[in-house]
Image (tube, coloured by chain):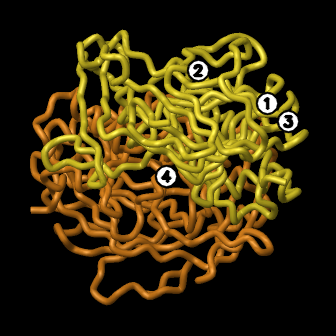
Chain colours: A yellow, B orange
Amino acid sequence: MASPITGQLARAGFAYAGYNHASTVFTALAAPILEVEQGERFILEARSLLTGGFFEAGEYEKCSIPVTGPVVVHGARPGDALRVDLHDIRVADRGAMVTLPGRGGFGEPLGRFGHVVEIDDGGVHFADGVAIPVRPMVGKLGVAPADGEPSSSTVGPYGGNMDCNDVTAGSAVILPVQADGARLFAGDLHAAQGDGECSLTGVEVEGSVTLSCRVLPGVAVRRPVVLSAGRVITIGDGDDLDAAALAALDDMLELVVVDRSWSREKAAMLLSAAADVAVSQLVNARASVKVSLAEEYFLHSPFSPA
Amino acid sequence: MASPITGQLARAGFAYAGYNHASTVFTALAAPILEVEQGERFILEARSLLTGGFFEAGEYEKCSIPVTGPVVVHGARPGDALRVDLHDIRVADRGAMVTLPGRGGFGEPLGRFGHVVEIDDGGVHFADGVAIPVRPMVGKLGVAPADGEPSSSTVGPYGGNMDCNDVTAGSAVILPVQADGARLFAGDLHAAQGDGECSLTGVEVEGSVTLSCRVLPGVAVRRPVVLSAGRVITIGDGDDLDAAALAALDDMLELVVVDRSWSREKAAMLLSAAADVAVSQLVNARASVKVSLAEEYFLHSPFSPA
């Protein structure tokens, strides 16, 4: 089946869900759009700012960036962790960015502005002579939360709008399962995004992502953990950056204490010397901060599939 | 002259100030320990946790990490910027870290703990089989503020305890001159430190740093800017991470707007797609956040010496 928005072909035999299966919330209540076995690869197509015509009509406020799902993973139960492996991300050859009054991470308010960019092997063509390297990532990825139906634009222990630019092809995301079947959602692809996503959006693109899932039975995680490019990355969320940083630091500290059987103080010192605290996003109602540490500091690679 | 704490020789002909010229504050009132011409290389030696015997006696609370200075730079006047180039950082072969009750970036308080590490070409030997790559940096660097005598452990527009791990040999720091002669102070060397310095200290080491200064006449900067490894890095300080991030983002936005003559919205979008927001330190009374953007995005390399 050819994707109506990127023109690419779904690979033969892969389960596939098109962009019409979009949700504006993470929820346990929606009917599944796919059911998959563990290890089975499947493809989710994702909408973006340019989908549906609102952006090009100048109606930026009507644009939404939903997630595609839910995907039920057979065998996933509350109390397990879900390991989501990202095998491939395909993005369209045009993307868009937007600023809106009252939003963004700057002292003086920004105005209302939209910008369309062409994307090819030479980069994201931001302006004459200004190309940004293409580094496709998934902004929103999460499971159904135990309670409530949070907007796809916010972030929490279930994942959500983490906007972590380490969630690239070849990475894995570990999420705490909170409902039977996990009920995975993904979307909000970016062709490029800096840490912080400071003006409100990344380079927002339509596209598709190829995923597979494994259940890690009885593995307790409080919040998402990303494994990417040889680094272990904890993701904290909070009402402000301080609260989000504290959550991500506590999660990383626990991983090291459990792995090394060190005191909290000794583990904290290792983090102080070798781990990096960065901002994933600071422009939404809840902030997202990440703490990353090279995998080589762990005795046992965390969250390996069985 | 041989350094009493690292054993290294000062290079012939370089002005040199030993670790006895330590100050616990950034101040315009202290007598200069050196006076230098623009472009003249000079060496400052720095104390650390292991200086003076308090650490090894277990009296961690009595340890201080002062700065060495002030150095008067001929020709520097309020309204100018000072470009400080770091040519070399030499560190001792032993370092230390400490945690103290009530300090650190974690939810549960840490206890009182000290840890001494050996340092050689193989890294910082943190524990059996755990070596952290050596990456010497200067934690505290600043000029005398216009008013007051802030502790060397805090951070502000004059620089201070930025704990920015991009301040390495080969980097440059741009500071707003606030008193005649600039009156530079530097110290707090780290053999390694992650972004955030989350447990309270980096790998604190005695050592020395070779510097030179140039005055950038009439160049207005509000806060420190670091040029390191092909990136331009603004440093914001604030009562919390959100305030510090906002300051650093505003500074970077202004650099791009001025350089490109773009609207604030367009410049903000470039930052959102290509700049990274990270935490320099979150463990002191004022937090320090950095925003970095590759130099190639600027038409004119900012803060080049004349």
User: Which of B222/A32 is in front?
Assistant: A32
Q: Name the image quarter holding the N terminus of chain B.
A: bottom left
Which mark, residue A80? 3
Q: Name the image quarter holding the C terminus of chain B.
A: bottom left
Which mark, residue A45? none
**Residue A30 locus on image (x, y percent):** 69, 13
**Residue B49 locus on image (x, y percent):** 63, 62
On screen, residue B255 above or below A63: below
Horizontal side of residue B263 vs A73, given as left or right: left
On screen, residue B1 above or below B116: below
Q: CA distance from mark 1 to mark 3?
A: 6 Å
Q: Chain of mark 1?
A: A
Q: Are marks 1 and 3 in contact (CB under 8 Å)?
A: yes
Query: Which of marks 1 and 2 precedes in the sequence?
Result: 1
Q: Chain of mark 2?
A: A
**Residue B248 locus on image (x, y percent):** 36, 37
Badge nearest the viewer, 2 or 1? 1
Amino acid type at mark 2: Asp
Which picture quadrant has residue A267? bottom right
On screen, residue A301 above or below A87: below
Q: CA distance from mark 4 to mark 1?
A: 38 Å
Give the SS element for disc 3.
loop
The lab-note entry on whether marks 4 and 3 share a chain reads no
* Mark 4 surroundings within 10 Å by alpha-carbon count, few (fewer than 14), some (14 through 19), many (20 or more): many
Mark 2 = which residue? A239
User: Which of B204/A272 is in front?
Assistant: A272
Q: CA distance from mark 2 to mark 1?
A: 23 Å
Residue name at image x 51 percent, y 64 percent: B189
Badge nearest the viewer, 4 or 1? 1
